[in-house]
Amino acid sequence: MSRDVSFNFKDKGVVVTGAAQGIGWQIARDFLAAGARVALWDKSEEGLRQAMSELKDLSKSAQSFIVDITDRESCAKAAAALTFPVHVLINNAGITRDKTFAKMEASDYEAVLDTNLLGAFHVTKSLMPYFVTDTAGKRIINISSVVGRYGNFGQTNYAAAKAGIIGFTQSLAKEWGRKGFTANAVAPGYIQTSMVEQIPAEIREKMAHATPLGRLGATTDIANMCLYLASDAASYINGAVLAVDGGLVI
Ligand SMILES: NC(=O)c1ccc[n+]([C@@H]2O[C@H](COP(=O)([O-])OP(=O)(O)OC[C@H]3O[C@@H](n4cnc5c(N)ncnc54)[C@H](O)[C@@H]3O)[C@@H](O)[C@H]2O)c1
């Protein structure tokens, strides 16, 4: 599908976590295409290598760094290695460990909270000294999920973490509004990435059918929202949860 989305982020610094593949890679790619300098953070060394090669010429303005967002030291090291000041942070890295509640172990719950919720804390905290000192235009964009607002069968851990991300976002929006930041959450529906490809094909088919637009989302659908939220056009949007789900929950 051809798309004409033009934003200009020339000379802006962007950090994207979980950028080796899927939604994070697409966000990184699209900010690069819009002129930004982008740090791709991910725990997968091989994934980052592949991600950088797929960026082709755009990789000249990209910097990749192996980071485990569950580890504060790892985040601090990556932040100190940045070659540019930060305007935009996209907390995107996430995992699933789906099980019904009866089968879910505390370790499944902890792993998902550690990455999806505490990880965003470590990353945001580590980057605090590296944001530009501008009095406006700074952006925190956190990738939540439709599941964080409405729950989901087999995802008590994931839903709790994604709901937590919404509370985190709204609180930051209140604390940092006067410091020149907006903080917003994006709540994707079902997006075609390897996370969703783990779900059996017939269930994916049902998900597409349950969506009023009749299809799963594309990674570009989420990247478009991030570009918009990071742009000056969204300067008065703060503490919002933007659904990008094809109307799944209406
Ligand atoms: N795909 C969907 O349908 C969907 C729907 C709603 C929300 N989301 C959210 O969007 C985000 C991206 O999802 P995706 O589908 O692209 O997932 P994905 O599994 O394709 O990619 C996730 C990336 O995060 C990285 N990652 C995981 N744990 C990490 C850690 N501890 N430190 C650093 N990197 C880590 C992985 O290596 C991977 O590259 C996640 O937060 C996910 O919960 C996805």
Image (cartoon, grey):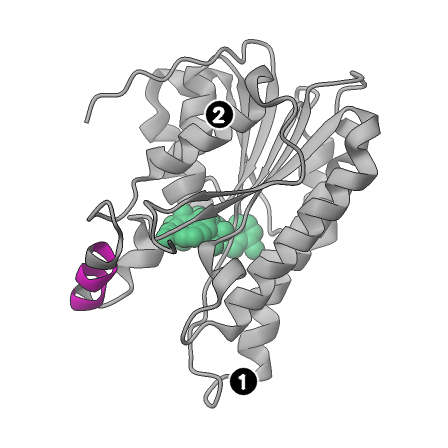
Q: Of 108 and 146, which appears nearest the observer? A: 146
- Residue 70 placement, left or right of 242: right
Find out if the beta carbon at label 1 lies less than 8 Å from the nearest ligand 1 atom.
Answer: no
Whether residue 43 is visible, yes or no, is no
The amino acid beneath tag 1 is Glu
> What is the crowding at mark 1: few (fewer than 14 residues within 10 Å), some, or many (at least 20)?
few
Query: Residue 75 sits in which quadrant?
Result: top right
- Residue 224 placement, left or right of 109: left
Q: Secondary structure at mark 2?
A: helix
| CB contact under 8 Å: marks 2 and 1 | no
User: Residue 60 — which label?
Assistant: none
- The residue segment tinted magenta is 202-208
Indicate yes or no whether the magenta region holds residue 204.
Answer: yes
Q: In the figure, 99 relative to 140: above or below?
A: below
Q: Mark 2 and mark 1: span between their CA atoms? A: 38 Å
- Residue 139 placement, left or right of 39: right
The amino acid beneath tag 2 is Leu
User: Residue 227 — which label?
Assistant: 2
* Residue 184 % position (x, y): 62, 38
- Residue at point 42% right, 79% down? 99
The residue labelled by disc 1 is: 105
* Residue 239 % position (x, y): 67, 40
* Residue 166 % position (x, y): 63, 52
Q: In the figure, 92 relative to 210: above or below?
A: above
